[in-house]
Image: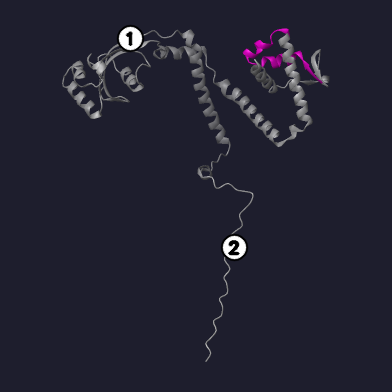
Amino acid sequence: MRRVAVLCFFALALVSCSRKESEVKGPYLAKIDNTAVTQADFDREFQALPDYAQQIFTDDAGKEKFLNEIINKELLYKEAVKKGYDKGQDYLKKVEEFKKLSLVSELFEKEIMAKAKVSDQETKDYYDKNKDDFIVAKEIKASHILVKTEEEAQKVLARLKKGEKFDAVAKAVSIDTGSAKNGGDLGFFKKGQMVPEFERAAAALKAGEITSSPVKSPFGYHIIKVTDKKTGDPIPFDKVRDLVSQKLSGEKQKGVFDAYVAELKKTHKVEINKEALTAKPGPAKTDKQEAPEKPEEKKAEPKKEEPKK
């Protein structure tokens, strides 16, 4: 509970609501010096809270507690201004960054999202064309012959092409002893029950077909034969409407965004310094620079006395 209250307090800190007393029309809920908090201010900050947090402040005691959170925020704000934190370079940089992000967000909402809305008809059309993607229980019955090497797998394929029975070859050479005794039969399986490589290969086959080439997996090399397929019913449209809409909206947004940025690049000069981008960072500079080494001084050699005659 305490953690939720702390989170709520920081959420409040992101929303500005207080007004000068001269700007207030009608009764106020609280006043800090000449700054008032109105019902409209209270409601706006309350609506900014997540749903789970709003539930904490629904009764009268909760409302008073929430109002005190707003008062606390205003007191801290006034103290921060008094200490001059609003003029600090770190703060001003954060304000500029926040303004930039807010403007970009505003632009994205009005120029990208507004042009990437998905209609109910588009959502329904996508569902109708891709119903197979929404099938709940699609089961495949398959048999396989598992060997260690690709060379062995090619030999198995050659034997099958010559007309040998699949189950007979499976019993003779498959290293999957559990299925080999049943002629390689694995029974029915659903998506997620087999390794991805095996599932993809089996899904691509029709009943009665055999893979034309070995399928590699962490277990070795498979020769797969699909013997039956059961197709379940697709999930009703009403249950996947939002999911489909989100998918299409995301795809549309990307398309609109890419086109929008491409147009912007035509009207702005954009340069990328690849040399600087790929350059390795040099050694970190230190405040104290090492003094250059002094060249060694050459000592004068003693004069040699000439021998007396």
Quarter occupied by residue 257: top right
- Horizontally, is 283 left or right of 75 in the view? left
Quarter occupied by residue 110: top right
Task: Check residue 288 for magenta coloring.
Answer: no
- Horizontally, is 211 left or right of 258 in the view? left
- Residue drawn at the location 67% of the way across and 14% of the way down: 47
| Numbered tag placed on residue 230 in the rendering | 1
- Of badges 1 and 2, nearer the viewer stands 2
Most common secondary structure along the magenta stretch: helix
**Amino acid marked by disc 2:** Lys
The segment highlighted magenta reads 35-60
Gap in angstroms between the C-alphas marked 1 and 2: 87 Å
Residue 106 visible in the shown view: yes
Q: Dot 2: within a 10 Å radius of its alpha carbon, few (fewer than 14), some, or many (20 or more) residues? A: few
| Numbered tag placed on residue 294 in the rendering | 2
Considering depth in this image, is 178 or 59 the residue closer to the camera? 178
- Residue drawn at the location 20% of the way across and 22% of the way down: 173
| 284 w.r.t. 82: above or below | below
CB of mark 1 within 8 Å of CB of mark 2? Answer: no
Disc 1 is placed on an element classified as: strand
**Amino acid marked by disc 1:** Lys
